[in-house]
């Protein structure tokens, strides 16, 4: 709730100061509402993943979003997926198995399931944002996500509210501000770049997650994470490379080359 609530007045003030309040008007409110539903669920799962797992491991599982995007493109969008990308999917999930070590690893199965579900939702949300960004301003998409999602979150607040220390309020304020900035940057990136390419750029977060996990919590990734993470990252890079090649082929075909 506190992650989303400040976004609404901040963006209203921003648009008012720039005399662009009309930009918030949208003929696609149903699409914004659908994005808010999946976005809220994805946010819940992401918070759960970093609560249940070490930071680096939770981040690594998030990288499977590119793999889920390939699966969704084949099953939902009915796109033709060739052996390169299916091979990348298998490689990525092999990395998941190496890290999770089902039945005998240090990763709790429920935590791994939550993290993988969060990555799946990231893939779904990326496709939704890509569609909305064809006609909507990035900040408009961020505004309606916050405006729609804060309603059910506010309804749940009476059941979970508790007092906060000044330090906890500072953390919540930082979460809101950096969350708003992250949402804007992600939405803008998906407007100007392909979904697979944008998701691949997220791999740099593993460096930050490892660093912050060590500095803040004294935790470093396990040996299995160091072995499995390169498989997942390699799968994502392979998908991005293949998407780039396919886009070049389509461009050449349109030019008649």
Image (cartoon, helix red, strand yellow):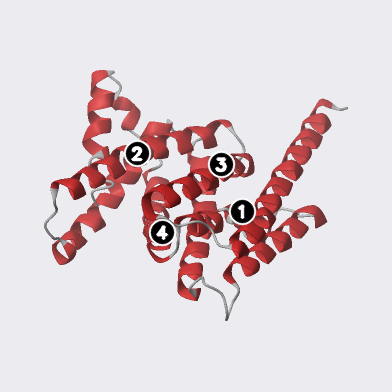
Q: Which residue is mark 3?
A: 204
For the point 66% across and 62% down, the residue is 95
Q: Is residue 233 visible?
A: yes
Residues 118 and 14: in front is 118
- The x, y position of residue 127, in whole percent, is 54, 48
- Residue for point 45% across, 60% down: 54
> Can residue 27 be seen from the camera position used here?
no
2 and 1 marks in contact (CB < 8 Å): no
**Percent position of residue 33, x then y:** 37, 50
Q: Which residue, given by chain and number where applicable, does mark 2 sit on?
A: 178
Disc 1 to disc 4, how far (Cα)?
A: 22 Å
Q: Earlier in the sequence, mark 2 or mark 1?
A: 1
Q: Which mark is residue 69?
A: 1
Q: Nearer the viewer, residue 52 or 150?
A: 52
**Which disc number belongs to residue 50?**
4
Which residue is rendered at x = 47% and y = 59% of the image?
118
What separation in Å lies between label 2 and label 1 (alpha carbons)?
Answer: 25 Å
Q: Residue at x 28, y 47 (%)?
A: 3
Q: Secondary structure at mark 3?
A: helix
Badge 3 crowding class, 10 Å Cα cut-off, few under 14, some 14 to 19, many 20 or more, is few
- Mark pair 2, 4: CA separation: 16 Å
Q: Judge by depth and name the residue closer to the eye, 206 or 147.
A: 206
Closer to us: mark 2 or mark 4?
A: 4
First in residue order: circle 1 vs circle 4: 4
The correct choice, above or below, for 205 with respect to 134 in the image is below
Question: Where does residue 57 sit, x and y in percent of width and height?
Answer: 51, 59
Vertical comparison of 224 with 183: above or below: below
């Amino acid at each position: 709730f506190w992650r989303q609530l400040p976004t609404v007045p901040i963006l209203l003030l921003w648009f008012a100061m720039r005399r662009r309040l009309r930009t918030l008007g949208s003929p696609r409110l149903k699409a914004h509402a659908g994005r808010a539903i999946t976005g809220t669920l994805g946010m819940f799962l992401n918070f759960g993943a970093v609560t249940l797992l070490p930071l680096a491991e939770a981040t690594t599982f998030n990288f499977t979003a590119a793999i889920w995007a390939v699966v969704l493109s084949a099953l939902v969008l009915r796109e033709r997926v060739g052996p390169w990308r299916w091979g990348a999917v298998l490689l990525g999930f092999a990395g998941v198995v190496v890290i999770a070590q089902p039945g005998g690893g240090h990763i709790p199965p429920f935590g791994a399931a939550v993290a993988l579900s969060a990555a799946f939702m990231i893939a779904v949300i990326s496709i939704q944002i890509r569609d909305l960004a064809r006609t909507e301003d990035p900040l408009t998409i961020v505004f309606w996500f916050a405006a729609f999602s804060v309603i059910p979150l506010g309804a749940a607040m009476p059941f979970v509210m508790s007092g906060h220390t000044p330090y906890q309020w500072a953390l919540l304020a930082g979460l809101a501000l950096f969350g708003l900035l992250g949402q804007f940057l992600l939405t803008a990136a998906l407007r100007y770049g392909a979904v697979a390419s944008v998701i691949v750029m997220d791999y740099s977060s593993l460096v930050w997650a490892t660093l912050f996990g060590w500095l803040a919590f004294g935790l470093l990734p396990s040996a299995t994470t160091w072995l499995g993470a390169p498989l997942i990252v390699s799968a994502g890079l392979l998908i991005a490379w293949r998407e780039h090649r396919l886009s070049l082929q389509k461009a050449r075909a349109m030019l008649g080359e």
